[in-house]
Image (spheres, grey):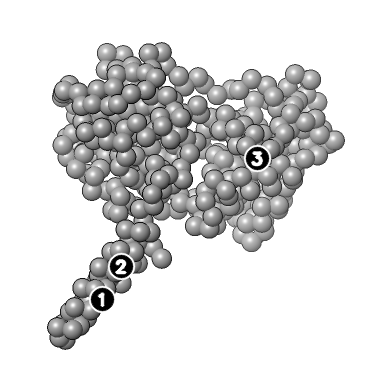
Amino acid sequence: MAQDDLTQIAMRAAGVAKKGLMLKLGAVAAVLFFVGLLLLGAMPMGSSAEASTCEDTGPGTGAAAPDSNNSPPAQGSVHNQQLTNAKAIAKASQKLPGRATLIALMTAMQESSLINRPDGHLDSVGLFQQRPSMDWGTKAQIMDPEFAIASFLYGRGTNKGLVDVPNWQTKPPGDVAQAVQGSAHPELYAGRESEVRALAKEAGIDLSHGGTDPGSGGTADSGTASGAEPSQCADSATDGSSAGGTFTDGTATWQLNNPRSVKDAIAWARHHSGLMSTNGWYRRCLAFVANVYGWNFSGVTYAIDHYKVVPADMRHDGDRNPPPGALMYWDTGHRAGHIAVYLGNGEIVSNDVKRPGYIDIVKADFIEKNWKAKYVGWTPPYFPKAG
């Protein structure tokens, strides 16, 4: 049962308590009971999130408002669903060279976070967010992973598949994905490569096999056919990063033209975290911090890139004394990196740290300890490309 539903039931329980003292006492007990459910169900101890969940996806990296359709289905953990679907993609593409599996995984990770979603933009559904109205099949068919994967690989209806892309074995994986998907954000597919390679390794998926069906898109040379070519993901590390330690409050101040002041931004972030957090923030760290300061969009695709668009004299590489309200950055080993708002007293507010898709408050060293990420540094809350 959703948190909002529990709250409404508790409020109704309290509302009927106007007929007598016993009913009032019963209503109070009901409220306490449901609050207890909220505390037990909505605030799990520990973290099920992984470092890979801090990557932003699609237009959500710019648009700061949470997308109500951005949350994955409730059954099973997100990571377990990703592993299951990755294995399904590997099985369906086993006759093709491993590069086909890599491209399919990158595409599905970008389109749906490798979750077989029943919803999406307009009528898009499934692993690859294919649309019934665009001749990819019926909704029920597209929601069948085997059907959807085959459609991506070999085409469906009037739509071409991966093997129909000329020279797909030698083209950059992101370009091949775009040739099939026709996305409004073609630059984002390439950013998924390091993440899906790590996932494939965990799932025991071989991305280097040659395959028995080379596909019809052309012949690759021996150096690129296996999918084992050097990663096309940009290096997200920066010099001067710290190796670890505690965080203490700095005293720097700024005069910036954000819609919200530092004080108001921190108050807003606290109010919208924990039990008050809405869903829909999965992998949308940059969107969230922009929203904290009142912006509708950040104007930057990846969190780690935002660190680079801030002027050099505002970047504090490896400094562990950020002032309250500062933006903090981590290299997670994936293309996007991670960004969070420092609240002061050694705490940050961030997405995916306790519950995938939700906002919670944790210690600032949580990202290093739990995600094994590398702290990069902090900047003032400066959004030069936001709006």
Residue where numbered disc 3 is placed: 203
User: How far from the left and from the top, in percent, is residue 307?
Assistant: 36, 23
Mark 1–mark 3 distance (CA, rounded to whole Å): 47 Å
Left or right of 248 in this view: 175: right
Residue type marked 3: Ala
Residue under the point 33% across and 45% down: 360
Asked if the residue at tag 2 contacts the one at tag 1, i.e. Cβ–Cβ closer than 8 Å, the answer is yes
Quadrant containing the N terminus in the rendered view: bottom left
| Circle 3 crowding by C-alpha within 10 Å: few under 14, some 14–19, many from 20 | some
Give the mark nearest the N terminus, 1 or 2. Answer: 1
Q: Quick one: 368 or 304, which is closer to the camera?
A: 368
Task: Note whether 158 is above or below 293 in the view shown.
Answer: below
Residue 120 visible here: no
The number of discs equals: 3
Disc 1 or 3, which lies upstream in sequence? 1
**Residue at which label 1 appears:** 13
* Residue toward you, 134 or 127: 127
Task: Identify the residue under disc 2.
Answer: 34
Instruction: Kindly report the distance in space between the C-alpha atoms of the residues bearing marks 1 and 2.
Output: 10 Å
The kind of residue on which mark 2 rests is Phe
The percent coordinates of residue 338 (x first, y second) are 40, 31
Using the image, determine if residue 11 lies above or below residue 269: below
The x and y percentages for residue 123 are: 54, 55
